[in-house]
Amino acid sequence: MLRMVLAMVVGLAGSATAETAIVAGGCFWCVEADFESVKGVSEVVSGYTGGDSANPTYRNHEGHYEAVEITFDPGVISYGEVIAKFLRSVDVLDAGGQFCDRGDAYRTAIFVQDTAQRKAAEAAVAEAEQVLGQKIVTPVLNAGQFWIAEDYHQDYYKGAGIILTRAGPKKQSNAYKFYRKSCGRDARVRELWGAEALTH
């Protein structure tokens, strides 16, 4: 009886089991900031994945992508919808990095954890290619170990400390905004996606 009642409550509140999506979209601070405000997303964690080395760090993550693990309620937002939003938050035409961050660590990618995710991700990529009328360079790859980044990278965009920038000392959250604007991230995403762009 108790199980039935719990099932009914869970059914009213949404899915009982959260799911995760792992994506790489350049600077993980920016992807985290974009997705923490998406309805149905409960947590976004910055980390490293895609490489062979164990226990990567910010100073030593050669071969790995900067990535995020997005935890979401599939009763509110589907995996395919998460991926569609992700594609609209990055420059899917740039294979050399993202915005002012260049190199392999800053490339885009979707890391799928099973066949269902692969099917949904490939469908989202195909749909996005149709919308843009151009070939998307963001690959769909098999997920491996996701290594959580150092604590100071988590929720970086909300930080209250003082950071020295090219424009002088700034509160960390303002330094993040300065960096994001200077890199032209949101401007480029809006140029590509227009009203569909996911920006912060």
Image (cartoon, helix red, strand yellow):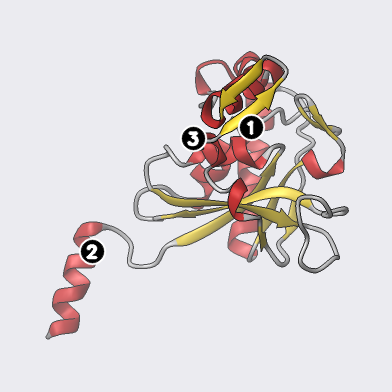
The quarter of the picture where residue 17 lies is bottom left
Neighbourhood count class around disc 1 (C-alpha, 10 Å): few under 14, some 14–19, many 20 upward: some
The quarter of the picture where residue 47 lies is bottom right
Tell me if label 2 and label 3 are in contact, CB under 8 Å: no
Decide which of 190, 26 is in the foreground and name it.
Answer: 26
**Where is residue 15 shown, x and y percent of the image?**
33, 62
According to the image, label 2 marks what residue?
11
Q: Amino acid at mark 3?
A: Ala
Q: Amino acid at mark 1?
A: Ala
Say which label, 2 or 3, has the lower sequence index: 2
**Disc 2 vs disc 3: which is toward the camera?**
3
The quarter of the picture where residue 104 lies is top right
According to the image, label 3 marks what residue?
160
Q: Secondary structure beneath disc 2?
A: helix
According to the image, label 1 marks what residue?
128
Q: Amino acid at mark 2?
A: Gly
